[in-house]
Amino acid sequence: MRAGLPTRVGWLLALAGLGALVGLAVRALGGGDAGFLAMPAAVIAGWLVFADPRECEPGHGRGDAAPPSEAPSDRRTSLVKRIAWIAVVVIAALAAYLALWPVPIRPVAWQAPAAPGYAGAHAVNQRLAGLQMIDLGGEVGPEHVALGPDGRLYVAVASGNILRMAPDGAAREVFANTGGRVLGFAFDAAGNLVAADAVKGLLSVTSDGRVTLLADNVGGEPIRYADAVVVAADGQIFFTDASTRFGPAGWGGTFEASVLDIIEQSATGRVLVFDPATKAVRVVARGLSFANGIALAADGQALFVAETGRYRIWKIAADARDLDLAAGPSAQAHVLLDNLPGYPDNLMRGLDGRLWGGFTKPRSAVVDGMAGKPWLRSVTLRLPRALWPVPPAYGHVFAFTEDGTVVADLQDPAGTYPETTAVTETAARLYVQSLHAKALGWLPR
């Protein structure tokens, strides 16, 4: 055996070990199974670089005379070449991964409007800073809050629990657990809590906490992401199905599924209506990029719907059926608020004719810049999650009237209270909803 072979074997083993460490790091950073490619890639690269081509020639290694010793300058040149080849192989492997590794989205190009920034009615302010907090007993994510017919406060949290408490947070208890994640709810005329559960579908919860499934499909097609719900005076139940492509049950949770849907921009969200008399579910409107919050007009004739992925709020006739909003406004639907400064989430009716909304995140120039570059959005999903262009935390809620006039705007640029989704307004307080907060924030009204 030639004297140089053990050295090369040592290099290969070292590279294999390094590849294993890199693979573990890639997986830890969110790269998934791509990490398994690191070790074989390192070994192949090492073999290409360190193998002596003459070892493949017939008769090599059977008594051949050893080559003369290399001069120091030749060894340095050889080392530089080897390092260069390693760099080439690594860069080629990385480029192939970024270009070809499968991702779950099929991105669609769209034209994002130029972001308006924080100006006019949404000028920067500190009115949301200094929230007072109600302890949730270790629960997280007071995504939806409402006063019940009994005068108590009901709060949906990430564990699947619906909490019930006095308006000041006293006497907190678990009212019900749906086994999923309730993102919105409303009360019907009988006092039942009607819930949009992102995992289970449309549910009804009796006053003693018994949970019943109302609907989990539309004509056999699953309701993948029930998000928000309102009950009309005639008993009809309107609710949003945020995405027919990505549901929390199959994609790691509500936040993860929403990110995939908004990055893809296939606009499969829809507004649905459930008739309690016939148990039938029909489509009111479709073609929304993540259909989110929903509220009824005061006269019950129209719906306000937040389209999170396109930064806007629609006004849709309540009696519309099977509208395709991807085709644009129509006689039964128009955009009430467009080109908003953030991602609109929940919508809640307040007092004195106000409706409240919230922005979970501010706009991102990087995300908007990728609107017309679907391939770049696919590349983004191949990066570790730590490198995804997620906008920073920024607390922001606002109120508007039914004609689209913004009449209140509260912000906390520091983002101390994360992912604000809307406001529940009572005679005494403004309760601020949140996707991930560890307490329920409120301000005196």
Image (cartoon, grey):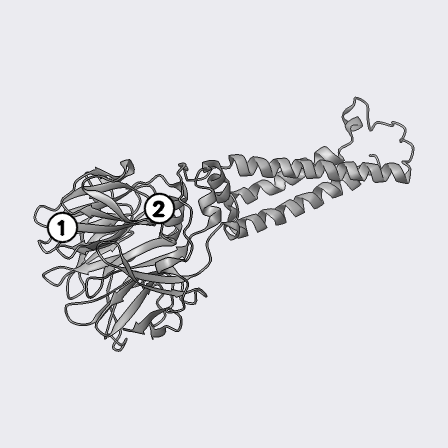
Q: Sequence-wise, which precedes: disc 2 or disc 1?
A: 1
- Residue 417: x %, y % from top left: 40, 66
- Residue 196: x %, y % from top left: 24, 54
| Res. 46 in view | no
Label disc, if present, on residue 211 of the rendered structure: none
**Viewer-side residue, 445 vs 257:** 445
User: What secondary structure is found at the residue carrying circle 2?
Assistant: helix
| Res. 113 in view | yes
* Above or below, 438 relative to 329: below
**Viewer-side residue, 206 vs 329:** 329
The residue pinned by badge 2 equals: 310
Which residue does the image show at 78% across and 31% down from the upper left?
Answer: 52
Q: Residue furthest top?
A: 58
The residue pinned by badge 1 equals: 301
Q: Is residue 271 left or right of residue 234?
A: right
Badge 2: residue crowd in 10 Å (few <14, some 14–19, many ≥20): many
